[in-house]
Amino acid sequence: MSPGSDDLEEPARTRLAALAAEMGEGGVEREDPARSVMAMLGDRWSPLLLLVLETGEWRHADLRRTAAALSAEQALSQRILTLKLRALERDGFVSRMVTDDVPPRVSYALTPLGRALVGELRRTISWLNERRGEIAAARRSYDELD
């Protein structure tokens, strides 16, 4: 199970064993969705890009400007946007469309899987917003310990 688990009381050992089994089913490797998608949702740009793409299909430059305008950072490099979009596309959350025009027009949109993920993301954001005061109070309390 884990080092030190022999020192735990039986109920804790049982819960820890159940957690280990649950994690084993969902995957513990770096590339397993339970780890990689959760990490992606914790990064600075991916959740915002998903939320913007929820509004419709976007061209690369427009998506970059809009995401930057909506973020606290107010800047999103083309390189980072491209990397984030490729990762979202790889996981099946975003589709990339290229036209036969000259020059080609590239646009991005959510897939059905991406729409489902945004629904879960919105539920998490709502939960966090409902508890904003509790979180702020906990932070203040913690910071006063220093």
Image: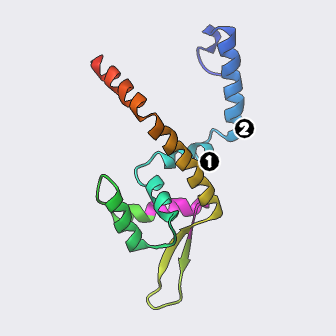
Kind of residue at badge 2: Glu
Please indicate whether residue 112 sits to the left or right of residue 98 in the image: right
Question: Could you say which is closer to the camera, residue 28 or residue 129?
Answer: 129
Write the residue at 51% across / 39% down: 127
Please indicate whether residue 117 sits to the left or right of residue 79 in the image: right
Q: Which quadrant of the figure contains the C terminus?
A: top left
Q: Is 89 in the magenta?
A: yes
Kind of residue at badge 1: Pro
For residue 13, what is the image quadrant? top right
Numbered tag placed on residue 25 in the rendering: 2
Mark 1 or 2 closer to N-term? 2
| Element type at mark 1 | helix
Q: Is 90 in the magenta?
A: yes
Q: Residues within 10 Å of mark 1 (few under 14, many from 20)?
A: some
Q: What residue is shown with label 1?
A: 33
Please indicate whether residue 74 sits to the left or right of residue 105 in the image: left
Q: Position of residue 126 (x, y in %)?
A: 50, 43
Report the magenta residues as a range: 83-95
Question: Could you say which is closer to the camera, residue 79 or residue 123?
Answer: 123
Question: Could you say which is closer to the camera, residue 56 or residue 80?
Answer: 56
Q: Residues within 10 Å of mark 2 (few under 14, many from 20)?
A: few
Q: Is residue 76 visible?
A: no
Write the residue at 67% across / 34% down: 23
Question: In this rendering, is residue 57 above or below 91?
Answer: below
Write the residue at 56% across / 45% down: 123
Between the C-alphas of marks 1 and 2, the distance is 11 Å
Question: In this rendering, is residue 142 above or below 97?
Answer: above
Instruction: State whether the magenta stretch is mostly helix, strand or loop.
Output: helix
